Image: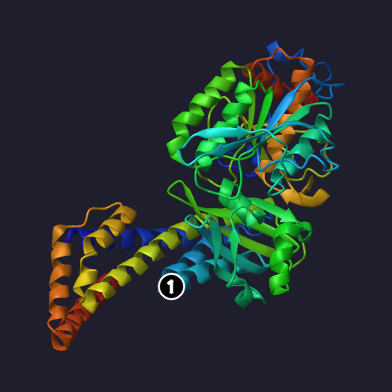
Amino acid sequence: MTDKDTDFESQLTNLQTIIQQQRSQIDLLLSQRQEPSASDEIKQAILETASFAIISASSSYVDALEAIVETAADVLDATAAALFLVDEKNEQLIFAVALGSKSDEVKELSVPIGQGIAGYVASTGQAISITDVEQDSRFYRSIGESIGYIPNSIICVPLILKDSVIGVLELMDKANGESFSVSDMETLGQFGNLAAHTIEESKLTHDMRYLFHQLLNGESKRFDNLDTSVDKIETALGIDTNSDSIKMAELVHELCQDGDASRKLALDILNNLVNYINAKSNS
Amino acid sequence: MPKQNPAWSWNSKSSNKKAFSSIGLFSPISRQNAFDGSLGSGIKIAIVDSGVDNSHPAVNGSVKGWSEPILAEGGEITFRNDPHGDLFGHGTACAGIIHNIAPDADIYSVRVLGSKLSGKGAIFASGLKWAIDNRMDVVNLSLGTSNREYFSRLHELVDEAYYQKVILVTAANNMPVISFPSLYSTVISTACYDDEKESSPLDYYYNSDPPVEFGAHGTDKEVAWLDGRYVRATGNSFAAPTMTGIVALLLSKHPSLTPFEVKSVLRSLANNNLTNTE
């Protein structure tokens, strides 16, 4: 068994322990539900467990982001929601996920970093909640005119990872018409932390798949970028890749260059190996 | 007693709002001799934020100076001092809160938030440095940074402010993340609290389990915003200016107080000091 296998199994064990702890916490809180003050804690525990399960089950980067936003909106009874990612190069916020009646229109938009509540939260890392935001004409009117939807209340928290704001999570218009509360902010803040880490992990998975796709294409020009791609992933993960892993990638690449038959053979072998590891992990 | 507000190190459970007894040394201090009758006259307050709309009715022309650090390509910082507006609305909200408490204080808008993320840590530090160098009495910092690269630089500036008797009032982050300068021990780190609708704007609480040391108004609060309008807002960043205003009242009446003494007086006059409720 390699170090990576050990790490994977260790992580899986840790996650199972966390889930079990959360279940125990919910059971305990449900038994105390006659106390009014327990309701927020129950909501929080359910949120953490439910969102963890949904997000963990997500198989792609987009699925994970949508699961984050959907769960957050559901728990806090929001009518619409959006998750923006920070595009540092272009100094703007990009709509990664938008939920609500006008979500398709919103997804086409990006927002300059110097505008609106989301821009403020991305710039400062401070969570805020605002009601009567339809009066914030500079930002929400321009968005509103584009999509025909102007929210009345907004709660916005940063997604912070490794000391940086990587995005913001914003919910709009509580279903009962009330303002978002401090308790909502606390809940969404924890959700934001979870989301930030999930986004980072999802990005890494996405990058790994892209790298694998590059290798299977068998184009020598792209193979030249292997070291750079591996370095990028290593930096993000905070690990040093075993030189055997790179050697293995080189061999796969070489097999693919040999033609379709060799490519198919390599794919079958890798599929069987992955299935074996998954079955072993689930047993 | 209102429900406590969340902030890391100071959670929302009301049981955490611990009452404490004053000690004899502080007993002569009262709100009456500390700041009653004060309107903040003679006090300079810097608002390091997104700029201030000086024409907003809630601000009422109280901004007397402007500064905006500009980062050149070579890394050099220069300062623009011509009047500027507010890009987000947040700085105007802070100014309105402060002006409501200390209407005679002079406000200086230090705009460090803009259309760019690049260099924001350096710009933020430069804005704080400007406030110290220009002898502000109180600096409202409703923002911070999580970037550890600026830990040392900001720490130096916060110490410099302490020794120059410049009071720094900071908003703790609402999330359990590292955020500077609110985590430095010499600042007045502030969070908001719930159930404030029936209380006085000058009500605040002391927390004996820092880093957050004070809780002030900042929940569902009507605040000034862009284009002369108002919104209702919640967040620790709206609680800090309340404490800034209170500090301005205190310093106006007792200008020789040092940061340590200001904190001690604030502690003594907090609403959860049992001596004040007896």
Across and down, in percent, residue A189 comes to: 57, 53
- Residue at 21% across, 75% down: A219
Across and down, in percent, residue A161 comes to: 45, 51
Q: Quadrant of residue A271?
A: bottom left
Q: What crowding class fits label 1: few (fewer than 14 Cα within 10 Å), some (14-19), or many (20 or more)? A: some
Label 1 marks a residue whose chain is: A
- Secondary structure of residue under mark 1: loop
Exactly how many numbered labels are in the figure?
1
- Image quadrant where one finds the N terminus of chain A: bottom left
Nearest the viewer among A105 and B192 is: A105
For label 1, the residue is A58
Across and down, in percent, residue B128 comes to: 59, 30
Residue B63 visible in this rendered orientation of the protein: yes
Nearest the viewer among B31 and A149 is: A149
Residue B209 visible in this rendered orientation of the protein: no
- Image quadrant where one finds the C terminus of chain A: bottom left
Across and down, in percent, residue A214 comes to: 26, 73
- Residue at 51% across, 66% down: A51
Is A206 rendered above or below residue B155? below
Furthest-bottom residue in this view: A261
